[in-house]
Structure formats: structure tokens, C-alpha cells
Image: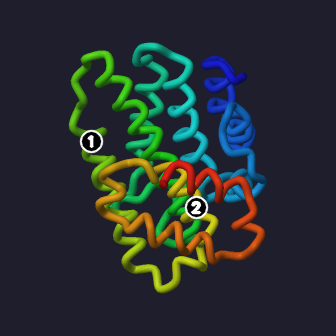
Amino acid sequence: MISQNQIVRLIEAEEFRQLIQRVLSNGRCRSPMVLHVLSQPEAAATAAIGLALQRLGELTYRPTELANELARRLIGMQKIDGLFGPDASSSREAMLVATSTALRGLMTWRSQIEACGGEIDEPISHAIDQGLSALADVYSDAPDVNEDAVAWAVVLWQLGDVAEFRRLVPVKDLLSMLDEAAADLVEDELCRYAHAVAA
């Protein structure tokens, strides 16, 4: 189990790979593929904070100041085009995994605020809307999504059950693509998670 204090310590020390690994071990996908792709230097900070926000939603009953700080930090990592984390020269894979984990973290934070009757501020909703639209644009512009099959599997695992994402991106097509991907992905736990969430 990873506690709030441990999350704080790992973020302060910028031990992003360790934070990712610790959060994944708490009832999430433990695939080495996931750890590898989320731990890329271009994506690790954003992915770690996004996963930490998701974990905090499980650890706490009410919104916390720590979660608020992490949400604000994530919003600050969003680029003008709506994607999170990496700069424009980064790989599409890094952009996809950083953006999907960040969005899920922000959605978790927003849901927790809503559940407690709190008021959602505009920057959170705007960041989520802009990020989802950016993912849809990446999908539309990608000449061959098979090139980034692992990253799209992470996107489906993180966002495949989100109604707005499903309206913007053809989830069934992405799932079909996964079924035709390389055998190492098709047989991996990540593919099962993606199918379970996005079914």
C-alpha cells in the first residue's frame, strides 16, 4: 500500500518511476509494458502525478489539499494543444500515455469534488475537455495507430469507460486494432485491462 505521505515524499524527490511502480502495484495493471511506457523520461512526471491523483481518490473520502495541489500542477503541465507533459518533439507514445493518465487523474479529482457537493472550477473542466479533444485529434491524424499500439492500450485502460472520450474516439476500432497487434501485446495483461475498461 502506498500512503499519502509516501506519495508526497516520492514527488518531492522526483522519484517518478518509483511512484508509478508503487501505484501500479496497488490493484492496477502490473504489466512490464505499462511500467516501461509510463516511465519514459518524457512522460514519467506527468504519468506519476496523474496516477497519484487516482490513488489519492481511493485513499481519501473527501478532497484534500494534496490532491488539489497535484491537480493544479497537472494543469500547469498541459500544453497549448491540450496534450500533457512532453513537448512537441516528444514521441506520440509519450504524449498519449502522459495525457491519458493526467486526464484520468483530473477526472478522479473532479468526481471526488462533485461527490462532496463542491463546486468544480473552470480550469479543471477546461483542461479535461481540451485534453480529450487533443487525443481525438491525435487519433484522427495518426497514419497508423498500430505504430503506437501499447500507448493506445494505455489510453483505453485509462479512458475507455469515459463517455465523452467514447464520443470523440472510435473505441471499438481501437479495441479491434489491439486484437490485431503484436502477440506480446495481445497476450499481455495491459490488453486485458484495456478490453475490460473499454468494453
Q: Is residue 169 above or below residue 43?
A: below
Mark 1: few/some/many CA within 10 Å (<14, 14-19, 20+): some
Q: How are the residues colored?
A: rainbow
Q: Residue at x 22, y 24 (%)?
A: 119
Residue 191 occupies quadrant: bottom right
Mark 2: few/some/many CA within 10 Å (<14, 14-19, 20+): many
Give the residue pinned by disc 2.
Answer: 153
Q: Residue at x 52, y 66 (%)?
A: 175
Q: Is residue 184 left or right of residue 190?
A: right
From the top left corner, tell me how far across and down residue 91 is, in percent: 57, 71
Instruction: Identify residue type, mark 2.
Output: Ala
Residue 48 occupies quadrant: top right
The quadrant of the picture occupied by the N terminus is top right
From the top left corner, tell me how far across and down residue 86 is, in percent: 52, 60
From the top left corner, tell me how far across and down residue 41 is, in percent: 67, 56
The secondary element bearing badge 1 is classed as: helix
Residue 52 badge: none
Q: Nearer the viewer, residue 71 or 173?
A: 173
Q: Is residue 122 above or below residue 178?
A: above
Label 2–label 1 contact, CB within 8 A: no
Specify which label sits upstream in the sequence, 2 or 1.
1
Give the residue pinned by disc 1.
Answer: 125
Question: Is residue 54 something that shows in the picture?
Answer: yes
| Cα distance in 3D space between marks 2 and 1 | 24 Å
The secondary element bearing badge 2 is classed as: helix
Q: Is residue 44 left or right of residue 1?
A: left
Q: Nearer the viewer, residue 71 or 187?
A: 187
Mark 2 or 1: in front is 2
Q: Is residue 73 above or below residue 39?
A: above
* Outermost residue toward the front in this view: 199
Instruction: Identify residue type, mark 1.
Output: Ser
